[in-house]
Amino acid sequence: MQQILKRLNLIQTSIELDDIDIIALQVARLERLELDDEVTVILQKLESLEYAFVIEAIEAYITKHKGVVAYVDREVQGLKVELKMLEQKIQDLDALKNEHLSTIDEFNTMYSLKVGDIIEKILKRKKELLAEQVAKIEEMFKKERELYNEHKRKVQKLEEELKELDEFDDEYDDLYEACQKAKEEANSQRKKVKEAKEKLQEDDEFQEYEEVKEEYEEFHREYEEVLNQEHFELNDNEKKELKKLFRKAARLCHPDIVINELYDQAHEITAQLNEAYAQKDLNRVKKILDMLENGVYFNTTSDKLENTEKLKHKIAELREKVAIITQELEAIKEDETFCIIKEIDDWDIYFNEVREKLKEEYRTLLKSENEQTWTKQEMDKEVPEEDYDYWEEPF
């Protein structure tokens, strides 16, 4: 009852001050409480903007119930406010962190879409060139290994023939001696294979080849994933709307501030919200927000806890969470990609400049000893311009 009376009083004062935002906020919070018929009528009149009636009705209601006095534990009251402020701080810090991460993700996605094709060609060409350089040493290793396999097959054949003979047969001793000699030759060849393998693995060019090969395969896999993802293009107004709606939705379902019973559900919805925000899916963010405002509702811990010790424990927990998110934000600000982004005034200009440098690098890689006389026009044929510009519209 005390909370209802206080919120009605706030609404009355807000009407007098013409503060529409506060009215809407208090109405939303009143609707979450158990209300009697009189307060329900007041809310209905507020919805129809009958403020004159509302002021009188609130005055009458407060007068009627002014004798209802409840004991207020000042320490609990102070702890609840402290907890509420920490909840809001976590929401703000987490929203900022997600915005930074989303910016980095958007930059990386655009980087792949704008120059990913030429990077893939560069890595593939490097891999091919290095493969040519290590081919001889690989061939030597393969020959030694094949020779070892031949020795093994010879030993197996001799051992099978020995099994068919009685050890007292005249042929047995000669065959046994030949088998032992074959084993010695196989062991000797095995050492040569091992040495060839070690030489191959220690070779600088081979190690570089393995690294470039792994880098190419990883980039190819990630590049394909980016190309197969659904990408949404937003104008400046839509980007501002996306950020506003995301922050509003995030406040309604943040898993760190809801009661324990709803943590898993809030965590799942938050994950969906973050994914939609990262993909710039404005419609999906709108749907999640609509669900939170009109369907699923999460009680915050500060609204439900009344026990002093539990409040103190939760406050300590959230203060630790604030410290963690703050550290994460500082780490993001030191991130190489984030630092690059801060220095860029125009992303399109930046990506065009990067692309030109990569094209020149690829032309250089395409040259060989027999291709030094190529003209720029001929080299451009190797890197068709249409391959570069398939993503013409700004992301």
Image (cartoon, helix red, strand yellow):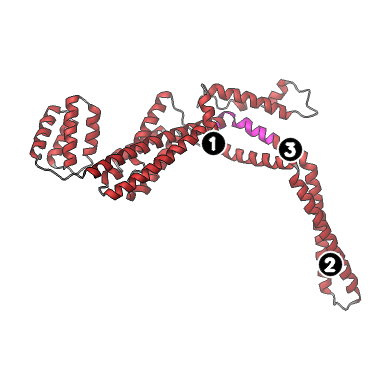
Marks 2 and 1, how far apart at CA: 57 Å
* Residue nearest the observer in this picture, 185 or 90: 90
Disc number placed over residue 158 in the picture, else none: 2
Which residue is labeled 3 in the image?
A: 130
The residue sitting at 30% across, 38% down in the picture is 293
**What is the distance, in whole Å, between disc 3 and disc 2 at their CAs?**
42 Å
Q: What amino acid is labelled 3 in the image?
A: Leu
Q: Residue 55: which quarter of the image?
A: top left
- Specify start and end residues of the magenta stretch as a single range: 112-125
Left/right of residue 373 with respect to residue 326 in the rendered view: right
200 vs 264, left or right, is right
Marks 2 and 1: CB-CB under 8 Å?
A: no
Q: Residue at x 83, y 70 (%)?
A: 161
Q: Is residue 119 magenta?
A: yes
- Where in the figure is residue 264, as x and y percent of width and height? 38, 48
Element at label 1: helix
Q: Earlier in the sequence, mark 3 or mark 2?
A: 3
> As rendered, which of 160 and 196 lies closer to the eye?
196
In this rendering, the answer to whether 338 lies above or below 205 is above
Eye-nearest disc, 1 or 3: 3
* Of the image marks 2 and 1, the number of the one nearer the N terminus: 2
In the rendering, which numbered label is found on residue 226? Answer: 1
Kind of residue sitting beneath label 1: Val
